[in-house]
Image (cartoon, helix red, strand yellow):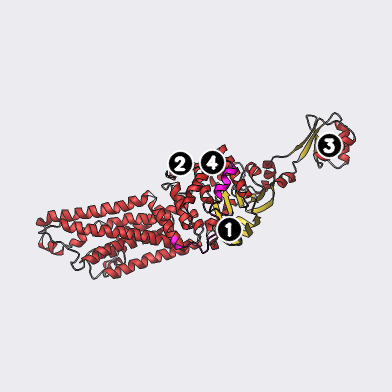
Amino acid sequence: MSTAMVNPAITGARGLRPGRYGISGLLKSEWTKLRTVRSTMWTLGITVVVGIGISALAAAETRSHWATMGPGQRASFDPTSTSLTALLFCQLAIGVLGVLVMSAEYGTGTIRATFSAAPRRPLVLAAKVIVFGVVTLVVAEIVAFASFLLGQALLTAPATHASLSTPGALRAVVGTGLYLGVIGLFALGLATIIRHTAGAISAFVGILLVLPIIIEALPNSLQFDIRRFLPLQIGGVMMSVNSQNAHSFAPWTGFFMLCVYAAAVLVIGGILLVRRDA
Amino acid sequence: MIEAHQLTKRYGDKLAVDQLSFTVRPGVVTGFLGPNGAGKSTTMRMIMGLDGPSAGDVTVNGRHYHDLPWPLHEVGALLEAKAIHPGRSAQAHLQMLAEANHIARRRVSEVLEIVGLTSVARRRAGKFSLGMGQRLGIAAALLGDPEVLLFDEPVNGLDPDGIRWVRNLLKGLAAEGRTVFVSSHLMSEMALTADEVIILGRGRLITQLPTSELLAQSSQRFVRVRSPGIAQLQAVLEREGAVTTTEDDGSLSVRGLDEVAIGELAATIPVVLHELAPQSASLEEAYMELTEDSVEFHGGAAGVAASSTGDRT
């Protein structure tokens, strides 16, 4: 291609517009990023399929064993948490996506293009938090409601079932979606600090699943005091109507703790983002 | 216009860039030359606000990169080839950059057209060759129609056609009055493209000068003379202050006088000239001479380290 051909085409969009780039453009940009890679479709697809599918299986399985269950089992049976069983698995898929939203930019070098377009890095992080947070929250709520409704429909008489008007049920279903949304942001925050996909996923899984096992080795009294702070414990309480006990936080207290964790890693991540070289 | 003032970058106890001051002017192609590991990429990343300087300062059009209101409209950069998510298409990559700076969607198609990637715009970039990755990087640099353009080793991985295309593109951009700053470790490439060169060795500025002057300054410049009356001519030339050497093939190498002076002196004698040929050491030689002391990794065992470390210090 000759220089003469190139020139007129390059001179296109001259004339700087007033103002400054800001969050609105970055939100669009982050939305484009999120929907143009396959990992988003895969992780959210797994969330939907596993969330609804396995929850339905759990409900159907309980129903088929109902006749052989003892009176004590029947009395303590929580149809709400049964229909939301699989959402604890979904947090792994959502956590992986949360990690990838940030770590994939570092892994591929896209981060330098991103920060060239928007050098105010906390603004980029804010746009990621909003776009990823809203998308996962919407998907997680849809999965939570679908799992609940399908699960309850499968728990036919004589098994007990819940409805959205059952005390605590709506709170548990909405809480499940919220828990997944915030745990995703927690993963995003970890990835902002750690920057490597494998490292961030390890940290996420470690905090979520390995930490509870380690704590199990502690003396009982200490164990209960610590365990209530764990995200998994908080999630378990949020997702059920009656699993709350003296050793765990109330559902919304737990949720508040979780929000504090997510905010903490995101703020630390944001500070490091500004301080470190891209 | 890019202005660096005492720019310094330290990694641990290693100085990657050491009190570097230079100015890159609009309207010309400025080459940024230095051996691998000299600090070229680090400097470019500091210009782009990606790496923070340990000391000193660098501005683009008088502002720090961080403070540019519409960065892509003011500065475009190709920093590394294939710095793109392999699962994302070229189209989507450019679109997300465009959206961040409110650049019209049609501009994405335009730059894809300019770099010749229109036909593969929707293909996953992971399948791109290095050359296609370079073209996509150039498309991204052109996206905001910026006044200042930075290219880090833009011809890496390109075929000869692609190299010629990049050369013309850079010259064209400079001819439009833009500031074009292009790094390379290959002097020969810069000789064909750059009007001016900034030479870097071990993070320090060695020199900044017009490409033509770099050539002229080289101590290797001499004039080869053949003549039937060579002995007579040699005496006259030496009297005029030239340093001459008789070569094995009977020709005379003359340093210190140019071909015009030699020709005129020959006419005054007069002697017949069979050859009067100004010899330039290649720019490559001139460059080697300048950077001789500042090559970070010399041959031998250290050579392996040099190639694996690459240019990304």
Q: Do marks 2 and 3 share a chain? A: yes
Q: Amino acid at mark 2?
A: Ser
Label 4 resides on the chain identified as B
Q: CA distance from mark 3 to mark 4?
A: 45 Å
- Which residue is labeled 4 in the image? B157
Q: Secondary structure at mark 2?
A: helix
Q: Nearer the viewer, mark 2 or mark 1?
A: 2
Q: How dense is the environment of label 4, judged by Cα within 10 Å: few (below 14), some, or many (20 and up)?
A: some
Q: CA distance from mark 1 to mark 4?
A: 30 Å
Q: Earlier in the sequence, mark 1 or mark 3?
A: 1
Label 1 resides on the chain identified as B
- Which residue is labeled 3 in the image? B263
Q: Amino acid at mark 1?
A: Arg
Q: Nearer the viewer, residue B303 or A163?
A: A163
Relative placement, left or right, of B62 versus A154 is: right
Q: Nearer the viewer, mark 2 or mark 4?
A: 2
